[in-house]
Image (spheres, grey):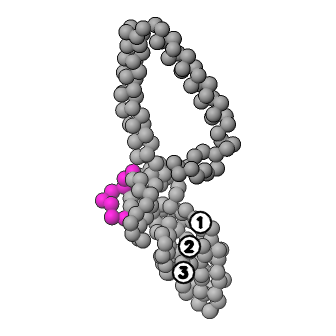
C-alpha cells in the first residue's frame, strides 16, 4: 500500500498499491466497495470526490483519471444490520441503533437488533396488560351486564366492523388525512 486517502462524508477511504491497484474500502463495514482496474503506471495519489461519487487518480507519469462510483450507502451490509459493529469511540463491538446525530462528523449506527428486540419487548408488555384486561372485561360482560344491553352492544360491534371493512377498502384510493388542518396526502 503506497497511499491512503479518506473521504470527507463517511468512513470510506481509497488505497493505492505499488502495482497500480486502486481500492475503495469502508472502515466500519470492513468491506471493499470497489477495486478499480490496475493502472498502467504507478499511482502517485488518489482522492475521493466530495460527494463520494468518484475517485480521482493521478499517475506518476502525470496522467489524470476520474472513475465514477455508485455506492450511496456503503455502511449498510448484513453484518452491520444484524451483527456487532465496533464504532469509533466505543470500547468494544456492540449492537447500536442511532440513525441521526447533531454533528457533521456523525456516523449512522444501523443495527436492527435493538429495534427487533425492542419491538418484541413492547409487544410482550402490551399483551401482559391487554390479555387480562380483555378476559376480565369479557367475564364482567358475561356475568354482570344485563342481556338486553349485550345484544345492543353486539349490534353496534357488527355495525362498526361493516364500516371499518368498507372504509378500509375505499380509503387507499382516496388518500389518508395527513393532519387535523384539512390537508390530504396520497
What residue is drawn where x is 47% and y is 12%? Answer: 150
Q: In which quarter of the image is residue 129?
A: top left
Tell me the residue that label 1 is attached to: 71
What residue is drawn where x is 50% and y is 17%? Answer: 153
Mark yes or no: residue 165 visible.
Answer: yes
Verify CB contact (< 8 Å) between mark 1 and mark 2: yes
Front residue (pair 49, 38): 49
Tell me the residue that label 3 is attached to: 47
Measure how far apart labels 1 and 2 are at the Cα level.
Answer: 8 Å
What residue is drawn where x is 48% and y is 62%? Answer: 30
Magenta range is 88-95
Q: Where is residue 114 in the image (x, y as percent from the top left)?
A: 40, 46
Is residue 139 inside the magenta stretch?
A: no
Q: On the rendered structure, is 15 left or right of 144?
A: right
Q: Quadrant of residue 173?
A: top right
Q: Overall secondary structure of the magenta stretch?
A: loop
Tell me the residue that label 2 is attached to: 52
Measure how far apart labels 1 and 3 are at the Cα level.
Answer: 16 Å
Mark yes or no: residue 21 visible.
Answer: no
Numbered disc in front, either 2 or 3: 2
Measure how far apart labels 2 and 3 are at the Cα level.
Answer: 10 Å
Counting residues from the start of the chain, the first of labels 1 and 2 encountered is 2
What residue is drawn where x is 63% and y is 67%? Answer: 70
Q: Position of residue 134 (x, y in %)?
A: 41, 21
Q: Where is residue 111 in the image (x, y as percent from the top left)?
A: 44, 51
Q: What element carries label 2?
A: loop
Amino acid at each position: 500500500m503506497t497511499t491512503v486517502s479518506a473521504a470527507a462524508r463517511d468512513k470510506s477511504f481509497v488505497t493505492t498499491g505499488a502495482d497500480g491497484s486502486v481500492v475503495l474500502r469502508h472502515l466500519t463495514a470492513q468491506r471493499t466497495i470497489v477495486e478499480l482496474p490496475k493502472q498502467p503506471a504507478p499511482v502517485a495519489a488518489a482522492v475521493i470526490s466530495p460527494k463520494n461519487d468518484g475517485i480521482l487518480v493521478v499517475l506518476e507519469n502525470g496522467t489524470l483519471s476520474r472513475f465514477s462510483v455508485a455506492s450511496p450507502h456503503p455502511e449498510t451490509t448484513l453484518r452491520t444490520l444484524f451483527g456487532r459493529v465496533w464504532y469509533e469511540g466505543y470500547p468494544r463491538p456492540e449492537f447500536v441503533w442511532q440513525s441521526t446525530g447533531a454533528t457533521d462528523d456523525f456516523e449512522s449506527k444501523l443495527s436492527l437488533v435493538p429495534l427487533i428486540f425492542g419491538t418484541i419487548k413492547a409487544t410482550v408488555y402490551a399483551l401482559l396488560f391487554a390479555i387480562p384486561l380483555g378476559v376480565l372485561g369479557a367475564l364482567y360482560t358475561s356475568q354482570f351486564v344485563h342481556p338486553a344491553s349485550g345484544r345492543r352492544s353486539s349490534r353496534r360491534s357488527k355495525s362498526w366492523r361493516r364500516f371499518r371493512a368498507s372504509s378500509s377498502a375505499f380509503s387507499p384510493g382516496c388518500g389518508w388525512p395527513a393532519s387535523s388542518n384539512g390537508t390530504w396526502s396520497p
